[in-house]
């Protein structure tokens, strides 16, 4: 019954009439009416405003739907964890790291985690913040290290802020040979007006930050290339493909392609709030909780900061 009730309540949020909901859920209208009436009688309150068009959920209906959806997620997590345990009886943990961070962070973290849980199977993947924001609640990943996530379903703790750098290609007027890193001055950012810029895909939370920063400084760039992550954007900028904004850790992980400068942006104006994120519930494993504690202990030293 719970599955059907969840489908019906979800249908109410998408469609205007019970007729449309019944077609979408492949059940009859009398069945929907009977199920809603019985459930409302059990709870002693209305779940659906059926006398209005469009139909809608009451507040109680939205809460019941939220619990039913959470029940499905917990079941999926249980199935996934049991599958992992059947393959790795010592337990399994999937850690997602922002692209470009893993090379710095994991060598410092892995030893500490393995020393605490010698039999634990650890899977390390790279994900952007926007993808991690989807994968954490679904149980696809257990922990994310990257930009702090602002989502009520996710427990996200800041480890601190790191400075960001504007990648200056060799052809730029701002390029200075022999000066890999230097601090920016107030007018440096204006060089980006009309300049070719390499962006990260539209779902990127980091790109949203960059867009706001440019807008606040009255800068309009010319978006010439869109890529999936900051690592690739930095690599292409170093190849002369345009400007981009990145982290020092990623610049130092680049193969030698071309000469660039890393222009350090004022940390009080623009920086990256790095954190560790996971979904906390009564079923959260000790592996997740203790690994999060280890990550917090390592902090930004994991990035060499």
Image (cartoon, grey):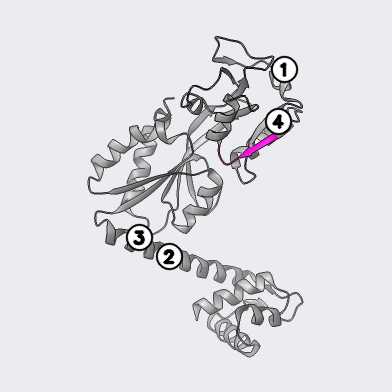
Query: What percent of the width, then of the height, locates residue 199?
Result: 64, 36
Tell which circle, 1 or 2, labels the residue nearer the N-terminal end.
2
Q: Is residue 125 left or right of residue 153?
A: left
The image quadrant that residue 79 belongs to is bottom left
Mark 3, residue position: 81
Q: Which residue is mark 1?
A: 187
Q: Work out how far the residue at label 4 is from the one at label 1, CA to CA, in angstroms.
A: 13 Å
Closer-to-camera residue (177/73): 177
| Mark 4 and mark 1 residues within 8 Å of each other at the beta carbon | no
Query: Magenta region, mostly helix, strand or loop?
Result: strand
Residue at mark 4: 214
Cα gap from disc 1 to disc 2, whole angstroms = 52 Å
Marks 2/3: CA distance? 9 Å
The magenta span reads 224-229
Q: Quadrant of the C terminus?
A: top left
Mark 4 vs 2, N-terminal side: 2
Residue hosting label 2: 76
Q: What x and y, as percent, mark residue 49?
A: 69, 77
Q: Secondary structure at mark 1?
A: loop
């Amino acid at each position: 019954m719970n599955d059907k009730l969840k489908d019906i309540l979800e249908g109410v949020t998408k469609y205007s009439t019970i007729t449309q909901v019944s077609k979408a859920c492949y059940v009859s209208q009398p069945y929907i009416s009977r199920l809603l009436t019985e459930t409302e009688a059990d709870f002693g309150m209305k779940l659906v405003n059926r006398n209005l068009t469009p139909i809608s959920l009451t507040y109680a209906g939205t809460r019941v739907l939220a619990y039913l959806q959470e029940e499905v997620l917990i079941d999926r997590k249980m199935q996934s964890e049991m599958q992992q345990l059947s393959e790795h009886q010592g337990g399994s943990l999937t850690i997602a790291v922002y692209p470009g961070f893993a090379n710095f962070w994991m060598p410092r973290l892995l030893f500490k985690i393995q020393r605490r849980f010698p039999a634990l199977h650890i899977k390390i993947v790279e994900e952007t913040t926007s993808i991690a924001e989807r994968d954490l609640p679904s149980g696809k990943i257990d922990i994310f290290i990257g930009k702090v996530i602002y989502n009520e379903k996710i427990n996200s703790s800041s480890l601190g802020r790191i400075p960001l750098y504007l990648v200056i290609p060799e052809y730029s007027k701002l390029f200075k040979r022999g000066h890999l890193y230097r601090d920016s001055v107030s007018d440096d950012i204006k060089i980006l007006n009309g300049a070719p810029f390499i962006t990260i895909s539209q779902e990127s939370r980091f790109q949203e930050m960059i867009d706001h920063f440019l807008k606040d400084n009255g800068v309009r760039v010319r978006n010439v290339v869109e890529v999936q992550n900051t690592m690739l954007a930095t690599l292409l900028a170093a190849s002369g493909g345009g400007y981009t904004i990145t982290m020092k850790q990623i610049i130092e992980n680049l193969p030698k392609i071309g000469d660039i400068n890393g222009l350090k942006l004022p940390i009080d104006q623009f920086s990256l709030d790095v954190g560790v994120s996971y979904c906390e519930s009564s079923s959260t494993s000790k592996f997740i909780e203790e690994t999060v504690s280890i990550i917090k202990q390592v902090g930004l030293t994991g990035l060499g900061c």
